[in-house]
Amino acid sequence: MPSQDVLPEQAVSTPSAARPRKPGRGGASRRPSHWWVPWAFAAPGLILFLLTTGYPLVRSLQISFYNWSVLPTQASTFIGLDNYIRALGDPQFWTSVVNAGVYLLMSVPATVALGLFFAILLQKKMPGRTLFRVLFYIPVVTSWVVVSLLFKFLFTTDNGAVNWFITDFFSFSDHAVPWLEQRWTGLIAISLLGIWKNLGWCLVVLLASLGGVGEELYEAAALDGANAWHKFVHVTLPGIRGTLLFVLVLQVIGAFNVFPSVLLMTNGGPAGSTEVPLTYMYKQAFSFLDFGYGSAMSFILAIFIFIVSFAQFKFLGEKKETLR
Amino acid sequence: MTTTSLQPKSLREADIAGGNERSKRPLNAWLLVRVAIILCGAVMMVAPFLIMVSTSLEPNTATLPNPPHFLPQNLTPANYEEAWTENNFAGFFGNSAYVSVLTTVASVVISSMTAFAFARFDFPLKNLMFSMLLAGLMIPGIVVIVPQFVLAKSLNMLDSLEGLVFFYTAGQIAFTTFLLRAFFERVPRELDEAMTVDGAGILRKFLVLYIPLARPALATAAVFSFLGAWDEYVWALTVISDATKRTLPLGIAAFQGEHSTAWGLVFAASTLAVIPVIAVYIAGQKHLIAGITTGAVK
Amino acid sequence: MMKKLVTLSSIALLAAAGLTACDTGGGGAQSAAVSTLSSGAAVSGEITFWHAYSAGGGEIKALENTVIPNFEKLHPGVKVKAMQIPDKDMHQKLVTAAAGQSLPDVVRADIVTVPELAKIGVLTPLSEAMPDFQSWADKMFPGPLATNKYNGKSWGLPLDTNTKVVIYNDEALKANGVASVPKTLDELKAAADKVGGKYILAEGGSGAWQMLPYIWSNGGDMTDPDVKKSSGYLNGPKAVAALQMIVDLYNKKAIPGVILGGSGGTPTGDGLPKGMYPTIVDGPWTFPNMATSYPNFHPQTSPMFSGAGGSISVVGGEDIVMTQQSKNKELSAEFIRYMLSPDAQKAMGQVGQLSAEKDMAETMAAIQPYYGAFLEQLKTAKPRPATPQWAKVDDIFTKQAQLALQGKLSAQEAMDAAVAQIDPLLAQG
């Protein structure tokens, strides 16, 4: 489980003792004084969530079992699992899932690793630190539409800035790379945008988390003669593990849901080879008015995401043990 | 209050992964390397943004300059003047500010309560409820947009800024609850128990102990909530039809025509739109670095 | 985590079980009786109008500062609330609003979406609702008018129209050793051989909007005249030969990669003035765009490359339609009449909106010199097949054409595959 406590008394012990203690869940202090107390705290959020997300989700699940007609005045036909069966046999759907997987592998590890790397560098005092933090955050706040169009221009085949660097500046190659005109290079360009855009987000969350790791732990580790790498592995990583997991899980979910960049950079082309699940679903629902099919695909995708998220919890849970 | 974690200020500012450089300064090559690496990263981060600002400061064109300009040629503020005065842009700015501020306040208040409940207590259906929040993060928004639209209509929330706040806040709940829960769970139980000994009730613990301790997370949640509301496009497009109720992203999208896009205007408007979010980030980031221990000794 | 997954899947099951309790709305067709709306009657009240006019070229200013105020002056007390929706988002917004029963009264809709909107039941058939419909229809060019037909009724009227002609950069042609702009498909092929390795023509995509002019000009077609089947047409020898010609030019690198969806390369309207692309096939909007970005460039026009079928281009543009949900159909009809009146057509013509009315042609040609070439081309231009399934049909065609361009299929194989997918859709109607 991603929870972990950093207790003050551990500060005075050795780095090895700074390892996460087994989370003491279900202790006496976790039991509310009255049954309604936790509900009173949770109610506003849960009610809001259930109303605006839970209910539409159930409706959308319902739609996925229908050949759904857009107009409420027209009848929809119940077709059971037909939309799901159709999706599982649709090669374009599988291509889109594979592309999302490729995007995930190319962008998420790099985004999180670079985010953590720069978060650590930027956590310490240095000249112009605030300015640098702002600069790293700028891509996060710039609209997806604008940056997607910008990257599309950077990767233009003839006269694009990236190709200019490749052919003229560094002379890696004589030929301009048709970045967005073929599958793999297109996915690389989209992944680079993903890394660039999301890095600052990871950085901000991890920076907040690093601030919460007790200094006394580092101090104790230093007294023990630990070097920088040891401190990173034995103090920093365990200290931010919950947040790191949170960042990873959200980035993975985000990768499966990659949308505006693909829509604007390649629009899934050529010949559907860079299609991702959301562009394909969007097309089915809003271009072809096949909402039932679009919903069915989204629930299949949700199952994928579930499996991957589960694997992450599992993997990181075991990792914690091997860190000792 | 406990003072267990009170640390000398200098120690709190000591580095994390590097050596204890405070004592070894000023001759520090490591600092130079660090600055160099960060500088490289920052240049990569900023380059596309420079293109945006440069283009916005050039005479308006229907096509993007290619190769792009990193520095403006023929400097002119015309796009900014036009973007600001045309199409009631100032009004869109006000709408976005109103919606984003209310969303930020509402989502931070509500989700810190929800996160507290999940982090601090065991209660029936807790795992079920938490799984549902998790599911909310996994389903892409466009899939539920039609049912949400029908719901917004029956709640009489079409064409209403408050309606936007309602749905934006709801949309942030899952994310901010996750974020805050991770921080609340890290609050040392000893501090909680010490307050029990002092005779403090749960509400007092929440307000005096947990909230101050989670300040970095609250600041992060606030920054992201603000950004989420400020940048949101698809939902606003779907529910807003009254031209006076448009938010900034709708106003910027309006500069993109069917056959041509006024890039100078789009980029000028986008640059203007980025400024408040950067301001919010600068305001929030002071708290991002405030360590968890700082709150405990207040 | 495992426990959470289990509980979550049980939510899903519970929700599925509970579905029988929900309903998806009433049954039956919605064809409400259409009442006839008298012309010239007093109107009052308020309507909303959705459109995708561009902000850049002054279209919105003309609409909001001239056309609508003039209409409101003609009918004191009425109000038209105009809402601009970006072109790329219009379809999504319309669909969502239809599902939520929140459509506006009048919409300026892209011509290819009208049959689809008619089919899902959100439009009022103007041919039945407006007693003076025929007199308006008679004014229109037949190509744009045909885009409003579905199921034996006419659901809208052409608000503006456009087509594409060959636009060329004379200097770039001469620099590549081509003395004059190719007039026919054969001359185009010959010119491509001459420029050897350099671009002769650029197309911004491989959809029906880009490819049909070649297919039609070569004497081929996409479907039969009733839009019931595509086999024997789209995979017929003339259509396939036209596509094969484009594929050959692409393989010779005489056509740049932008044809694969328009994502990777320099846009056509950018490459032409820069001299990268000597010729493009594009619409009237190119002129004001190039005038702002490349003031020193003077584009020249020539009719669409001709072949066995003549010089046939494609009709674009928008229709004006009235929704079923409109609460003030009298005023909506009156607004539609005004939008089609010489006053409004002229005001919009001044900012780039070409009228689809025959007797406006002279006025239009006088407003902008470059309109002349497009008006001439419009006389033979054809609309894309009017079918509610158009979005899917075009998607299938585009994908197969891209596979042919990439060399993954021959042009014949690609079109055979396209026909096999398109015909079942056309059969659904």
Image: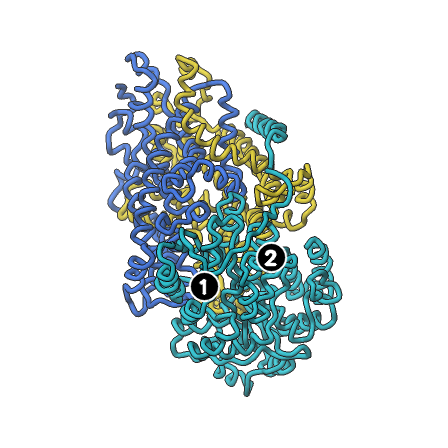
- Locate residue C101, reporting x and y percent: 51, 44
Residue at image mark 2: C115
Cα separation between marks 2 and 1? 21 Å
Q: Residue at x 30, y 51 (%)?
A: B91
Q: Residue at x 56, y 77 (%)?
A: C377
Q: Is residue B185 above or below residue B220?
A: above
Q: How many marks?
A: 2
Which residue in the rendered view is the most extreme toward the bottom? C179
Q: Residue at x 47, y 29 (%)?
A: A2
Few, some or many residues within 10 Å of mark 2 (<14, 14–19, 20+): many
- Note the chain letter of the yellow one: A
The subunit letter for the residue under badge 2 reads C
User: In what element is the residue under mark 2?
Assistant: helix
Question: Hey, what amino acid is under mark 2?
Answer: Pro
User: In what element is the residue under mark 1?
Assistant: helix
| Nearer to us in this view, A311 or C418 | C418
Q: Is residue B195 above or below residue C320?
A: above
- Locate residue A168, reporting x and y percent: 46, 69
Q: Colour of chain B?
A: blue
Residue at image mark 1: C339
Question: Hey, what amino acid is under mark 1?
Answer: Met
- Locate residue C376, reporting x and y percent: 54, 78
